[in-house]
Image (spheres, grey):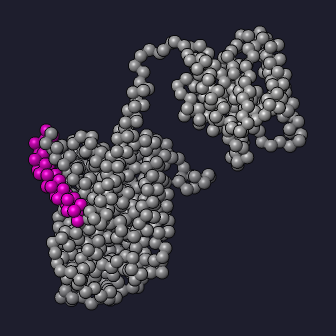
């Protein structure tokens, strides 16, 4: 088994795709980890903004979460309809492009790209934050831990969609069971204590109030809490990953994700107020996440605490998996439409879009490095892309139902109108509230990505126009090309190049770059003896030898100038440059050579123009032989050359 097979698994055939599609059970961890994981940092992000209010801030977390839950319900109903209307995948890009036009579709795609990218960074950094809460000694290793987890998730996704869903099922459902258990037990104690439960492990005291209640502060807290809704769109974008009936399974997965998320958000907000649990700044050495404090307050710091925090850590870190499922599919759609390189549309060995997975991993890693793996620094950038995509998707669905010839379209239209209005208002609030804190970066990146997409599309359109051939084949100028054979020494590699040139044309120009007159004279003597004399005897065309002296030991510049002169001499002929090249049997042998042939080939491809054709003539070097084997090889080579030498009659016929 190769190392690649061990890491990624054996290659899958295209016809095996149906066997690797998922159901609801695998769909929740594959596409829902972003939404479920956001329950850990969404309420905490809102509580962080309420810190200036001290204990008074806990009074407002409940109403803020209720507004978020109402918005979540609207999104749920809207995306159920989107999945039914677009059973082949109804992500924001597809819906906006088909109903609002290509430009707004690209705007939705740009928003999703940023959302997926930030989700990876925020999810992993929040997961490491949970780990640091339980093990403060790891505080100094936040960034290495983030990058290590990113590498693990990348590897799992390269192994395949179904494999990643199954691998992440255990931590996902452990997270759900543990948190539901903690929230259920906490709720029971609140009810049995008359609303004043006694914490098993008291959370840190809330700081004193440093500001009064203001509308702007509450608006900013709501904007931060909206990060809890990111990831809801992922299911509609990944419908094609589900087994038949795909739309029904996708709707079931969406229902499960939203129901679990709503219960977690409501329970965390309620118990945070009951147990007087507030947020802490993540860069504090004694930092504890809200879930860490809440779990400790309900069950203490025993075994159950560590199991729960471990499951929270796992789900937060693995919440990036949602992006690894959605981002490559989005890139695939953009590549098919010509807005990204076509390599993004190709499936890898495990039937996943490997290029998209790799690019997402690299960009997310850079983002984590820039922000040091700290969640609080990433949150302000986060929700803009998600809510812009939400708004465009809902608006697109409004236009869809307006055009639909469906007698039952009016109630569906109303749901999407409410969804578009609600998410649009939330987007404006988030932009205004978070602009100075970092949302301006997202606003700046969106036009940059739009420009990138347009340039890629423009390039492909240019290629299409240049290569289009709606006419019969051009039969003019079909004479043999002028063949140029550059070489460094007269050896078997150069010999193979000249012999191949003799089969292509009678106009052959051999070119040698020498560093001194003595070297030139020595080569000319070899050329007369080994090339001109045998060819004259066989009545074959004799190549013209040009020796170019290069006192400054340059190779590339004299050759390129020589070929430019040949192009002017033969303006209506193709110039075929044959590049003899040694091919080594072992990769490490290439370290022993200067690769002049590869450099020349690259230079000609860039500067040669349409008149120049580059042809590689490889000489395959055998394994290093023993003395006896070497003598046998030389004898076989001599016999082969004698047998392969053309007779005068055959040479004339071939020429």
Give x and y (percent) for residue 622: 77, 39
Residue 413 is a magenta residue: yes
- Whether residue 198 is in magenta: the answer is no
Please tell me which residue is depicted at 43% across the width and 75% down the height of the picture.
131
Give the main secondary structure of the magenta stretch: helix
The picture places residue 281, in percent across and down from the top left corner, at 34, 77
Image: 528 above or below 158 = above
Which residue is rendered at x = 59% and y = 17% of the image?
A: 570
Q: Using the image as rendered, state which of residue 267 and residue 519 is in the foreground.
A: 519
Res 315 seen here? no
Name the quadrant containing residue 461. Answer: top left
Q: Which quadrant would residue 378 be assigned to in this image?
A: bottom left
With 603 as the anchor, is 641 left or right in this view? right
335 is higher (above) or lower (below) than 273:
above
Name above or below for residue 618 compared with residue 103: above
> Which of the two residues, 320 or 314, is positioned nearer the viewer here?
320
Image coordinates for residue 366, horizontal then vertical, percent: 45, 60
Q: Is 291 on the left-hand or right-hand side of 98?
A: right
Q: Which residues make up the magenta segment?
A: 404-433
Number of labels in the image equals 0
What residue appears at the point 77 percent right and 9 percent down from the top-left corner?
Answer: 649
Q: Position of residue 454 (x, y in %)?
A: 34, 41
């Amino acid at each position: 088994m190769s190392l690649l097979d061990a890491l990624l698994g054996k290659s899958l055939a295209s016809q095996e795709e149906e066997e690797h599609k998922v159901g609801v059970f695998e769909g929740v961890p594959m596409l829902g980890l972003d939404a479920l994981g956001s329950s850990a940092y969404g309420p905490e992000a809102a509580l962080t903004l309420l810190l200036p209010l001290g204990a008074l801030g806990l009074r407002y977390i409940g109403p803020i979460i209720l507004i978020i839950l109402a918005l979540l319900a609207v999104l749920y109903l809207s995306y159920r309809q989107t999945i039914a209307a677009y059973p082949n995948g109804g992500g924001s890009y597809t819906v906006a492009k088909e109903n609002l036009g290509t430009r707004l579709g690209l705007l939705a795609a740009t928003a999703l790209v940023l959302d997926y990218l930030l989700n990876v960074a925020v999810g992993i950094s929040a997961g490491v934050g949970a780990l640091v809460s339980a093990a403060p000694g790891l505080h100094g290793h936040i960034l290495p831990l983030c990058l290590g987890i990113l590498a693990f998730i990348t590897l799992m996704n390269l192994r395949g969609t179904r494999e990643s869903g199954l691998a992440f099922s255990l931590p996902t459902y452990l997270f759900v069971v543990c948190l539901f258990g903690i929230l259920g037990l906490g709720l029971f104690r609140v009810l049995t204590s008359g609303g004043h439960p006694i914490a098993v492990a008291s959370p840190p005291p809330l700081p004193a109030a440093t500001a009064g209640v203001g509308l702007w502060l509450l608006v900013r807290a709501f904007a931060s809490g909206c990060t809890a809704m990111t990831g809801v769109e992922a299911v509609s974008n990944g419908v094609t990953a589900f087994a038949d009936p795909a739309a029904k399974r996708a709707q079931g997965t969406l229902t499960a994700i939203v129901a679990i998320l709503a219960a977690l958000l409501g329970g965390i907000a309620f118990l945070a107020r009951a147990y007087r649990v507030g947020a802490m700044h993540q860069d504090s050495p004694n930092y504890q996440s809200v879930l860490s404090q809440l779990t400790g307050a309900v069950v203490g710091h025993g075994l159950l605490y560590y199991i729960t925090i471990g499951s929270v850590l796992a789900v937060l870190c693995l919440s990036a998996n949602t992006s690894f499922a959605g981002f490559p599919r989005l890139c695939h759609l953009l590549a098919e439409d010509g807005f990204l390189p076509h390599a993004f549309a190709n499936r890898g060995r495990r039937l996943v879009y490997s290029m998209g997975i790799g690019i997402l991993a690299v960009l997310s890693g850079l983002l984590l490095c820039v922000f040091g793996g700290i969640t609080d620094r990433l949150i302000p950038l986060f929700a803009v892309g998600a809510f812009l995509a939400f708004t465009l998707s809902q608006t697109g669905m409004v236009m869809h139902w307006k055009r639909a010839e469906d007698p039952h379209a009016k109630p569906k239209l109303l749901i999407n109108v409410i969804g578009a209005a609600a998410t649009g208002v939330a987007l404006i609030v988030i932009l205004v509230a978070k602009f100075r804190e970092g949302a301006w970066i997202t606003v700046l990146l969106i036009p940059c990505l739009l420009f990138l997409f347009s340039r890629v599309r423009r390039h492909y359109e240019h290629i299409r126009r240049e290569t289009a051939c709606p006419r019969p084949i051009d039969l003019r100028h079909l004479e043999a090309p002028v063949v140029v054979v550059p070489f460094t020494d007269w050896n078997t590699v150069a010999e193979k190049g000249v012999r191949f040139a003799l089969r292509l044309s009678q106009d052959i120009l051999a070119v040698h770059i020498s560093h001194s007159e003595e070297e030139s004279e020595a080569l000319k003597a070899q050329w007369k003896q080994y090339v001109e004399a045998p060819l004259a005897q066989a009545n074959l065309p004799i190549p013209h030898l040009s020796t170019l002296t290069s006192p400054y030991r340059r190779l590339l510049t004299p050759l390129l100038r020589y070929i430019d002169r040949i192009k002017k001499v033969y303006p209506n002929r193709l110039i075929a440059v044959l590049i003899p090249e040694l091919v080594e049997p072992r990769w490490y042998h290439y370290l022993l050579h200067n690769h002049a042939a590869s450099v020349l080939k690259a230079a000609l491809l860039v500067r040669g123009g349409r008149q120049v054709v580059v042809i590689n003539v490889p000489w395959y070097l055998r394994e290093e032989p023993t003395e006896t084997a070497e003598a046998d090889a030389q004898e076989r080579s001599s016999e082969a050359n004698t047998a392969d030498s053309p007779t005068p009659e055959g040479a004339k016929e071939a020429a």
